[in-house]
Image (cartoon, rainbow, N blue to C red):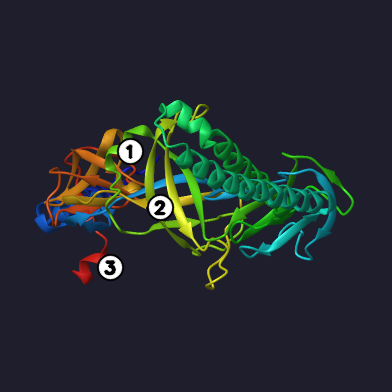
Amino acid sequence: MTDHTSNKPSSAKSWLISLVILLAGAGFSWLIFSTEPEAQREGATRKSAMLVDVTPVQVGDYSPIIEAMGTVVPAKEIELQARVSGEVTGLADTFIPGTIIQAGKLLVELDDTDYQLAAQQAQVERLQAQAALHIEQGEQLAARQQYEQLGREVSEPQKSLILRAPQLQQAEAAVMLADTRLQQARTNQERTRITAPFTGKLLSTGVNLGSQVSPGDDLGHLVGVDRWWIEATLPTRQLQWLDQENTAAVMVHDRQAWTAGVMREGSLISVLGQVDEQTRLAQVLIAVDDPLGLYSDQPALIMGAFVNTRIPAKLLTQVARIQRELVRKQDTIWLMNDEQLEIRTLNVVFRDEQYVYVKGSLKAGEHIVTTDLSRVIDGAALRLNSDQSNGN
């Protein structure tokens, strides 16, 4: 027979222990919820705010930069051409493509034998004409004496014939014609010597010793070295911002030939009244003096090179200048106001390669968010990067 009375104390003990545990758990839960400080809730909210960096808005007067690509062309060039025919009998030692030729330098010499003989013959003809004029002048004196001895009046036409006026005019005309032929013969003889009309760079040559040339044949291509032009193109909408009276230098850079940061100075000299037929872009002309660096230590431009130009635009007054990457879609910007994100639409008046220029949309001292945000909601909570907070 089993004795159940011995288990009663054990069951009561287990029930008592369970009750104590239940009461302790309830008390612990009450303690947690009743003692949660408000400061911890604020900290949780602060931790949820997005961490950002900012930069202050600066308002002032700025000259934007218009970027334009252009081709280097000579401001002065000429095709050296023969003006008389003949055999090439002499070439200058410097008559080599790529060399610098000084103004007045003899480059090509043609056989001038025939032209020298023609000049001598013209000289003889001139002497003969002068002699004939002197003889006629003697006849004039004799005719005048005879007319005076005649002692009667005659009509003007008769008097002109008696005094041999037509013969005198004919003799004088013969002298003038002889002078002209002599001058032409001497000019042709001089044209057998082709010289450089200006100091330039010889780009090409077209003859050798012994070559037979005729008038109009190309002998060589010469370009001036004192100034070259850059024919640059830019959108027609940017023409309104060009200031041709501005003396600020146009900066020129050849990306293919020069190292980064190397620049040449030029000047905007004109806006061409036409657009490029292929690109439909407006064209401007930029001048660069001493393009080959012959008189300075400047890097040399290369004829035909495609170069980058930076043209100062008209001055913009009281505008905010912002890095292009900080301007968001649809010309908006992110600002931090009272630790909240504000998305503001900008009134953009000009853009260049680096900056966007804004009128009236921003105030000096406002803070532009420079951090890329994962969620962009107007009014979202923001907080400054600790480094910037300490710096401020």
Left or right for 260, reference 281: right
The residues bearing labels 1 and 2 have C-alpha atoms spaced at a distance of 13 Å
The residues bearing labels 3 and 1 have C-alpha atoms spaced at a distance of 41 Å
Asked if residue 29 can be seen in this view, the reply is no
Asked if residue 139 can be seen in this view, the reply is yes
Left or right for 256, reference 388: right
The residues bearing labels 3 and 2 have C-alpha atoms spaced at a distance of 36 Å
Q: Amino acid at mark 2?
A: Arg
SS type, badge 2: strand
In the rendered view, tell whether residue 390 sits above or below residue 227: below
Residue toward you, 356 or 242: 242
Q: Amino acid at mark 1?
A: Gln
Residue 246 horizontal/vertical position (percent): 28, 54
Q: Are marks 1 and 2 in contact (CB under 8 Å)?
A: no
- Residue under pointer 2: 310
Residue 95 horizontal/vertical position (percent): 76, 60
Camera-side mark, 3 or 2: 2
Quick one: quadrant of the N terminus? top left
Residue 99 horizontal/vertical position (percent): 70, 62
- Residue under pointer 3: 387
SS type, badge 3: helix
Left or right for 147, reference 113: left
Q: Amino acid at mark 3?
A: Asp
Quick one: quadrant of the C terminus? bottom left
Residue toward you, 130 or 284: 130
Query: Can you tell which mark lies on residue 238?
Result: 1
Residue toward you, 144 or 94: 144
Dot 3 crowding, Cα within 10 Å, few <14, some 14–19, many 20+: few
Residue depicted at 32% across the width and 38% down the height: 239
SS type, badge 1: helix
